[in-house]
Image: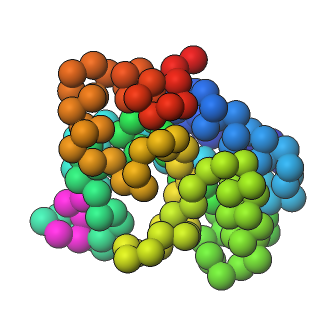
């Protein structure tokens, strides 16, 4: 099954090279029925997610405050396979579909959150960060604050479209 309308909308907000890699991933493994659950987030949206399990009810879902997630710069997406039942996300990251998803993502040059060391693994997360470190730092935030998302894309070595 192809990417859903909402997945395509989410991909339209991220860096075109990241969006192209996700579309290619979907084409390479149509049996996984890859869907995009998260794409670009504002810093305020990131701060709200960061508050979950800390100052608001729920479980902790991120360790990144606003400006410290690649989602804030259109360089990350969260994915889920719908390999068992179309339209039903398979959140069992121990299922072999997840290993295939991660393998394909990495073969396309993406960094998978499943490979993180020293931090909690984030298997649904895939990012395209170019020359930047695994997580955005104060330098990335400064680039964004002096320019915009395109300035960050250019500084990453990935380039703007």
How far from the left and from the top, in percent, is residue 13?
51, 28
Q: Is residue 52 magenta?
A: yes
Confirm whether residue 39 shows in the render. no
Figure quadrant of the C terminus: top right
For the magenta stretch, what is the residue range? 50-54
Residue 140 vs residue 54: left or right? right
| Horizontal and vertical percent position of residue 151 | 37, 22
Q: Is residue 122 left or right of residue 68?
A: right
Dividing the picture into quadrants, the one containing residue 105 is: bottom right
Classify 90 as above or below 140.
below
From this viewpoint, which residue is outermost toward the left? Answer: 55
Residue that extends furthest to the bottom in the rendered view of this protein: 94
Residue 60 can be seen, yes or no: yes
Q: Image height check: is 46 above or below 147?
A: below
Q: Position of residue 58 (x, y in %)?
A: 28, 70
Q: Going 71% across and 79% down the picture, which residue do you hit?
A: 95
> What residue is shown at x 37% (from left), y 77% (from top)?
118
Image point (50%, 31%), residue name: 157
- In this rendering, the answer to whether 47 lies above or below 154 is below
> Quarter of the image holding residue 120?
bottom left
Q: Is residue 101 part of the magenta span, yes or no?
A: no
Q: Nearer the viewer, residue 94 or 119?
A: 119
Number of marks drawn: 0
Name the dominant secondary structure of the magenta segment. Answer: loop
């Amino acid at each position: 099954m192809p990417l859903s309308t909402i997945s395509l909308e989410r991909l339209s907000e991220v860096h075109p090279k990241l969006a192209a890699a996700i579309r290619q991933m979907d084409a390479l493994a149509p049996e996984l029925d890859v869907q995009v659950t998260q794409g670009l987030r504002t810093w305020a949206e990131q701060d709200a997610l960061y508050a979950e399990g800390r100052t608001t009810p729920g479980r902790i879902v991120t360790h990144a405050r606003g400006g410290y997630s690649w989602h804030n710069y259109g360089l990350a997406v969260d994915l889920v396979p719908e390999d068992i039942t179309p339209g039903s996300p398979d959140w069992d990251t121990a299922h072999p579909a997840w290993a295939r998803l991660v393998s394909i993502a990495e073969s396309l040059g993406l960094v998978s959150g499943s490979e993180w060391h020293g931090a909690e693994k984030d298997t649904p997360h895939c990012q395209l960060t170019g020359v930047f470190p695994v997580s955005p730092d104060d330098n990335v935030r400064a680039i964004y604050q002096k320019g915009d998302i395109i300035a960050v894309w250019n500084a990453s070595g990935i380039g703007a479209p």
